[in-house]
Image (spheres, rainbow, N blue to C red):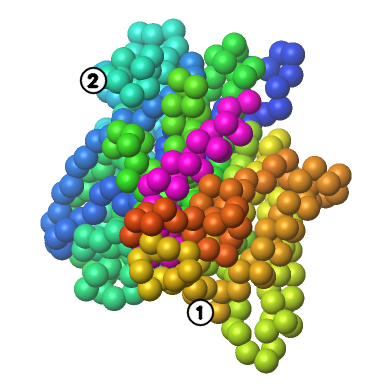
Amino acid sequence: MLGIGFSPALRRQRPTLVSVPPLYLAANLTRAAYAVDAISAEGNSRRESRAPFFLGGELTEIWLVYANWHLPLGNCAEVPTGNPVMLAAALELEGVTVEAPNASRAAPRRMEDGETFLAGPFRASDFGLDRFRPVADPLGPAAHFARTSMWADVGQKLPRSGQYLSEAPASRGHYSLAATHVHLTGPLAGANNGVAPSHIAVIGRPTPAAAANWRATLVIGDSVCEGQADASPYPAVARGGGYVARAHWNNGGRHLPLAQLGRHGGKLAHYRAGGAARRSMAAFATHALLAFGANDLFVLADANLASRQAALKAAWLADLDAEIAALRGAGIRHIRVAHVGPRTTSSDQWATSVNQSPQANWQADFVASVNAEIVSRVLNGKANAIDAAFDVNAHWGEGGGNAKWLVNGAANHPTGDGTHPNSALMASAGAGLAAAVAG
């Protein structure tokens, strides 16, 4: 059972005339499901790193969210790490460190296996400030940025270094959810059955003036959404690329707060069944973007193709509608769903259109019908209504469709594997989404 360590007092309260501003996702944490720390040796081990994050506006206090669970590639459900830890969290601002009152190095807090934990509050007054301010130049030196720290004693052996958590013990890896400073100490013993805890989000309380215009987005999707093949032009602190990251990073001079908690291989059904902790982040968001489908819509092309397609579409749309209802129930006021893009093979490295063919058991016309169902939910006045759809194929599909990749004659221009768009197409989609989310 996953333990969600949220104090009831932290759950986002509806603003009233006399209430203080609520807590929201407060920083731009993009490509959050990529590994940033791994233990490369067994036995006694120690690994430290540090990375900043950029704030979405003026805040009076900050909370750090840690997860003692991971997302195995097979089903992308939240699985306990196998390591209860003693955790102490800290926040650094321009070289000044403040430790969380209830998670100090002197008295670390036990983080149970499978738990999600909010560490804080870290108040601006702790640093002699009246408020935390975002950077003036998002792509320049950070005048006011924050860095998270985490220190943990881990009671079991950590896995060998690797980006993904695989089933093969020799390559079992650490799959972190965000940039963090991790200090792990031994002795570490036992089988290859544990991973380190990770930092998944930053929560903050905006100033009253900032709260009136605050927007914070929870993003759940797959590797296409998180930008697997995108070589982002942004600093390493942006944690990579992808069209969603590009749209929220430096949008009109402002970093729109974001928690991107997707996963390679993710399917909507997996998330519905095993995404409770990630879904709980909706309590601190105003917007949500769902971007599934690239792994969901394969159908065996046999004599029963039509019935298989009908059953899969019905199940997928039922999961989508259930997630829409869950997000609305959590207080999300704006839901956007992305279209599903192409999946093709190519005999000339995607240099031309004519040499592209659908991947095995991928039917473009069936995917197009699912995309049409997404569009049908936009402001339809029903319980499954969404506020917007985002047509990725307008930016990377031939003729704006989902059957083939948009080519320019250069090998690997649109994609290098037929599934994940490369940087040029990600940039185009990012610009389109940036304009859509700017309002």
Instruction: Compare marks 2 and 1 and give the one earlier in the sequence.
Output: 2
Crowding at dot 2, Cα within 10 Å, few <14 / some 14-19 / many 20+, comes out as few
Residue 360 shows which numbered tag?
A: 1
The residue lying at 28 percent from left, 63 percent from top is 173
Where is residue 320? Give x, y as percent.
69, 58
Residue furthest right as drawn: 381
Would residue 353 appear left or right of 297 to someone viewing this image? left
**Which element type, helix, strand or loop, lies under badge 2?**
loop
What residue is disc 2 on? 95
The residue lying at 68 percent from left, 74 percent from top is 312
* Residue 202 visible, this angle: no
Q: Amino acid under label 1?
A: Ala
Would residue 126 appear left or right of 430 to someone viewing this image? left
Q: Amino acid under label 2?
A: Gly
Quadrant in which the C terminus is drawn: top right
Would residue 63 appear left or right of 385 to someone viewing this image? left
Whether residue 400 appears in magenta in the rendering, the answer is no
Would residue 96 appear left or right of 269 to someone viewing this image? left
Task: Please name whichever residue, 96 or 119, is drawn nearer the observer in this view of the structure.
Answer: 96
Residue furthest bottom as drawn: 303
Where is residue 174? Give x, y as percent.
30, 58
Crowding at dot 1, Cα within 10 Å, few <14 / some 14-19 / many 20+, comes out as few
Q: Magenta segment, which residues?
A: 414-439
Quarter-of-image position of residue 407: bottom left
Where is residue 230? Give x, y as percent.
37, 48
Residue 7 shows which numbered tag?
A: none
**Which element type, helix, strand or loop, lies under badge 1?**
loop
